[in-house]
Amino acid sequence: KLDIPKNTKSITLELVSNNPPDIYGFVFDGQKGIQVDNYSIRGHGGSGLFNISSKYIAEQITKLNTHLIIFQYGANVVPYIKTDKELAYLEDTYYKLFTKFKYAAPGASILVIGVGDMAQEVDGEFSSYPYVRKISDAQKRAALKAGCAFWDLLNIEGGLNSILKWSSSGLAAKDGHFSPKGQQLIG
């Protein structure tokens, strides 16, 4: 634990070791109020979390006094899920991931945010990916089966092809990424 003065603008950490440790991040939390820690994996479907020991996850959840875990994965797999067999595998993967964290954090609530709408261009026309609704439904089934809450982003947006309206309104790109204004609205 370090007492960092409020006016600190930068910190440099240098590690010297023959055996470098695994570092997942640094925590710069205050002593009171709500603290938000983000374990962001850009361009990832979430399965990399299986590589972290359940014991380590449980220890960190206890140390950080975590009460709410939010998962939002799926957008990066939408273009690649093209069969019901792939969808079933994805649903099972999410169920196992949510269950892993449920056991590691029995006192915490877990919220799963479903995949949002994403459009693809076919013959010059944009429309939702064929499996986007099925992926959202699979995430919901996996979440509820694991005892987690589910927030249906796709329905909040307006359902299939809603990303086209969000895009034309400047709230998102057709690939599903929200603009800052869209992020604020969804938040």
Image: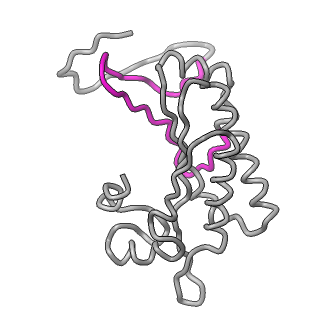
State the predominant SS element of the stretch in magenta: loop
Q: As drawn, which residue projects farthest toward the left?
A: 7
The answer to which quarter of the image holds residue 17 is top right
Q: As drawn, which residue projects farthest toward the right?
A: 85
Q: On the rendered structure, is 4 left or right of 108?
A: left
Whether residue 34 is in magenta: the answer is yes
Q: x and y percent of residue 66 in the render?
A: 48, 25
Viewport quadrant of the N terminus: top left
The answer to which quarter of the image holds residue 47 is top right
41 and 182: which is toward the camera:
182
Q: x and y percent of residue 100 in the render?
A: 69, 32
For the record, the magenta segment spans 20-48
120, above or below 55, in the image: below
83, above or below 98, in the image: below
Q: On the rendered structure, is 157 left or right of 149?
A: left
* Count of all numbered marks drawn on residues in the image: 0
Q: x and y percent of residue 96 in the render?
A: 73, 40
- The residue lying at 38 percent from left, 57 percent from top is 186
Q: x and y percent of residue 73 in the render?
A: 57, 50
- The residue lying at 52 percent from left, 48 percent from top is 42
97, above or below 138, in the image: above
